[in-house]
Structure formats: C-alpha cells, structure tokens
Image (spheres, grey):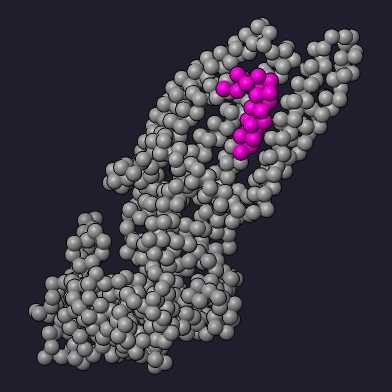
Amino acid sequence: MRGSWGWTAHEGARLNTSFLTILRQIPTLFRHTVSLAWRADPWALVVVAVSQLGQAAATAFGLLATNRVLVSLFAAGPTADRVRDALPSLVWVAAASAFAATLRAVSFAAAGRLGPKVERLAGLSMMEKVVRVEMEHIERSDFHAVVDSGQHGQTAARRLIDHTLGIVEALMALLAVSGVLAVLHPVLLPLLGAVIVPKAWGTVRAARRTYESVQIWLEHVRQQGALRRLLISQKAAPELRVHGAGPFLLDQFDQMAAQAADEQTRLAHLEARTELATSALSGLTAGGSYALLAWLLTQGHMPLASGATAALALTSGTAGLRRMVTHIHHLYEQSLFMNDLIRAREEAGQRAIPATGTRVPDPPEVIAFDRVTFRYPERETPALDGVSLTIRKGQVIALVGANGSGKTTLSKLLAGLYLPTSGAITWDGTDLRALRRDDVFGHVALVLQNFQQWPFTARANVAIGRPTEIHDADRLDGAAAYADAHRVLDDLPYGWDTLCEKGYEGGVDLSGGQWQRIALARAYFRDADILICDEPTSSMDPAAEIDAFRRIRALASADQTIVLVTHRLHSVKEADVIYVLDEGRLVEHGDFATVMSDDGPGRFRRLFELQSLQYRTDIAAGSPPSDAPADTLDAVPTQRAPARQDVRPGRSPVNGPGQSPAGGATG
C-alpha cells in the first residue's frame, strides 16, 4: 500500500495543542464529561461524588487524629500513661481509615458501573449523526479520517470518567491535607505545589506528543488495519493462496508495523528524557521542603508532634498531588481524543441529511429530471450532464449504457441519495431539495449490484428493509415465495435463523445467486412504491434470470414503479421506456420498438445486435456489424484468445493428440 500523507499535511495546521489552549479547553471538556455521566447514570454519579467527599473528610479527620496521637506520645510522663492517652485517638484513626476504605470501594463499584455506560453513550452520540450523513460526504476520504479519529474518543470517554473521578478524589484529599498543613503552619502550604510543578509540566508535554503522533499517523494506522482485515478476509483468501499474494501483503504489513514501532520508540526516548528532567527537579524541590521543615523544628517554630504530623501530611499530599498530576496527564491526553469525537459528531451533524421538508405521504405520480447535472466531489467531469427525463407511476423504466455512462448515479439521484449539482428533480412538481428526505426514502426500495450482504440471519437479511416487521411470518413467507428464496432457505441448516456469514459459529456462505434471491426478497418485503434494481440478476443462471425479471416486471401491475439498470439488453424488451445513456448524457429513449427502429439514432439497436452475436452460430467469429460502436455493453468477445500451445511430441498445438485440424486422425 502507498502511505498517504495528504490528510496529515492538511490536518497538521489543526494540531493546536499549546498548553494554554488545552488548559482553557479542559473545563469545557470536564463539564461535557460530567454531563455525559449524568445522562448515562445519574445515580451512579451521585454515589461517586458523595463517596469522594466522604473520603476527603475521612482523610482530614485521620490526619488530625494522628496529630493527637503524636501529641500524646511525645508528652512528658510514663510511657504507659502516654500510650493510654493516645488510645482514643488511635481508635479514631482506625475508624477514619476503615470509613475511607469503605467509601473507596463504593466509589470504585459505582465508577465501574458508570464507565461502560458513558462509553456506549459517547459512541452512540457520534454514530447516530454519522448514519444520517449525505452520501456524497460518506464517500469522501477526509470525512472518513475525521470519523476514524473520532472513534478514539469513544474509549476516551470512559477513560475521561475514570481520570475525572481520580482527579476529584486526589483534589479532595489534597484539600484535606492542605487544611491540616494550614493549621500546623501556613508556610508549609506552598511546598506542596513546588514539589509537583515540574511533574505537571512534563506530563503535559508527553500527552501533547502522543496526541500529535496519533493524528499524524492516523492514515498509516487505517491502512495497516485494512491490510490486517485483508489477511484474514474470507473473500480475499482464495487469491491470497492461489496467487501467492499472502507473502506480498505480509511484507507490506511488516513494513508498516516496523514504521509504527520506530515511531513508538521515538516517543519512548523523548518521554524518558522528559521524565528524567522532571524527576530531578521534583527531587530538588522535595528536598528543599523537608529542609524547611527541619529548620522550623530546630528553630522552635513548630512542636515535634506537629512536625511529625506535617511530615506525614507532606508525604501524603505529595503522593496525592502526583496521583492528581498523573490523572490530569491522562485527562488531558484523553480529552484531546474526546475533542475529536465532538468534532466528528459536529461535522456529521453539519453534513447530515435534513430531517425537515415537505411531507410526502403518497407515492409520486410523476418524477421529472430537468437538465440535471451531477458532479462527484473532487471530480472535474460530471457523472451526469444535462439529463432530462420523466418517470410515471406504474411504469417499467430501463436505464442502459456502457460502464461509466451514469446509470447507477442516475438511479441514486432518483432514490434521493444524491442531490443534483444543477438542474432539478421534482416529485409531482416539488423539488427534491424541498422534500423531507426520510419520506422520499420511505417510498423507495433498492436492489443494488453491490447490495449489502449483512452478517445477520436470513430472517434479518430479508426484513432489514422494514425491521419493525421482522417477526411477521406471513410477510416473510410472501417475500420468500416472490423471490423463489425457499429453495435457498431449505438448504440452510437453521432455515430463517441461519447466520449468513461463514466466519462465525453456525454461519454459512451463500452463493452469489442465493444472495441475489435474498436481495429480491428483501426488496419485496420492503413493499415500496418505487423499486430500483441495479443488475439484480448478475449472479443467476439464465433460467433463474429470466424468471427473476418476470417477477420484477410483474410488480408494475400493482402500480409499483420499476427502474431497471442492466447490461442485459434482452431483459428490457417489455420496458415502457428505455433510456440510453452515454458519458453522462441521455442519447436515446423510447420503448423497445422505438429504440430498435432504423429511423432512430440506432444507439441501442447497434448495442443490442452486438450483444446478441455471442448467442448466434450463423455469423463468423470476430465479425460484428460494421456499424457497431467501439465501446460495448460489456459484450462477451466472440473470438477466443489463442490457446496455449502444447509442444509435447505427438500433439497438435491446437487440436490435441492425434487430431488433424479437420478433426480426423493424423496418421
């Protein structure tokens, strides 16, 4: 594969990850995380918050009780009396410790319940926007890059909860320790911050480097994932083995993995240097703090018991600060990815199919294309250029033309999947742009050439067009009968409940023809007013193909509009109107008799005659009509390629052993 850095170069300008910028964003992300947690499970969030406050109170109380223990132990008098005086305070220390441990367990359980719900909600909040994005954006690589980057935010949401709670816990403990230090001696309070500032600086730098690396290497990771899927793909497996393509793909995969490993090594070396520098600075500040505490004790500014309590508080506070900085590091890192999820969600929302518009309760009597031009994003040549045509309710319409002529694009415009670049598509006089698109979709069923083969049961594969009716047995049986799919179901080990995906336990692999029967049943089950079939029988045998077209055409008798996109010109003889496209333009139209007439342009007639040659034996091979066009509708060549010569003794290069060109014996 070829590494693409185009997106990276474009997105490099967006990596605005300066410390102050992110610091300003963290409160917003913090609020967003808490809001997400509240939506996911408010009761669990309340339990966590109360537990954190209780732990902070227990920590402060425990330190003060410890100070009372030390005061009693350092007092004058017999040892037994001092220990006896300290016992009540020791009991309170133990009680505070037990209470804090209990609350910690409660908080851990509630957080464990909250995290998965937040992750699910975050992922759903993005995907429910993505699923409504306009088709033209779904096909853009830059949008896929945004969504792929946003997917990191789904797991980041759960981690944000963990780290947010960790920060709150550490902050509560820090406030408790700070209160105790302020009571013991105010000058000790700033020492906590001095110890941890170098660590905070280092963690922010490390997080920023990690995020920038992920963004720059995102396209690389996507390509590596594509290679991984190909190596285990059932579809690719035959060629990987027969063509020996496995080693080639493995070599590509190994090269990309090695490049990724080099990047991780680079990050590790940078982080090691940063860690060494920040640890050295933190060690110096910690040493200075304890030196100041020793000076306060030796100068008589603090009793010995208070000094011992202060030492414990400094140790506890420093450890808490380190935990808090670690959580801030990860919060900062994960918030960057969460920000990507928010960005992906917002961009998907901006590119979404509008949910508003004029309602379309009834099927249209007339659909009209008026000088419609459509150009795919990042393409200069239009796929359709100035096409005007009319489709009436209950008609059978055929769209024919060479590959790339615009047939499939036109059918997708008809279905409302695309909007014209210029010109207008109207349903009973109302512009498609003004219609509520969900209503438009509700009137359409698709049988595409590359229709989706869902890795679900046969039942779900048929009913996915109307999933609310999945348990309607009569409707399922009717769809199966229409598509003659019972012969497929009879071969499945579990009938309707057979999983149509070989890679899972109990799953089976359907043939192309079987899948097309499932697709036809799906279209019938949907019971839409407009049925668009794009090469619906390409994998069927001739008898099954004829039968399938007969069934499709029969739907028009019930006022269903049928649009056939096909290369098999013999199947469109009974169409009401045949539209012939060439390089995005409409070049001919009419019923079969009209387009086959000598009086017309003759485009369809020449193509039809050329395609029919492959079924005739009365015409010399390689002799198409003199007026046949250079480009054909995938016509099968009538002249065989030369056979590979066999030069073994006694063999004719063409006719085999002992055979003359005329078919008689050679000797």
The C terminus lies in quadrant: bottom left
Which secondary structure dominates the residues rendered in magenta?
Answer: helix
Instruction: Specify whether 613 is left or right of 444.
Output: left
**Residue shown at 59% from the left, 28% from the top:** 321
- Magenta span includes 33: no
Q: Which residues are magenta?
A: 168-190
Instruction: Specify whether 471 is left or right of 148.
Output: right
**Residue shown at 71% from the left, 31% from the top:** 59
Spot occupied by residue 56 in the image (x, y as percentages of width and height): 69, 35
The answer to which of 43 and 626 lies nearer the viewer is: 43
Spot occupied by residue 254 in the image (x, y as percentages of width and height): 39, 39
- Magenta span includes 173: yes
**Residue shown at 59% from the left, 31% from the top:** 323
The answer to whether residue 420 shows anywhere in this view is: yes
Above or below, 491 relative to 46? below
Residue situated furthest top in the rendering: 298
Above or below, 557 relative to 238? below
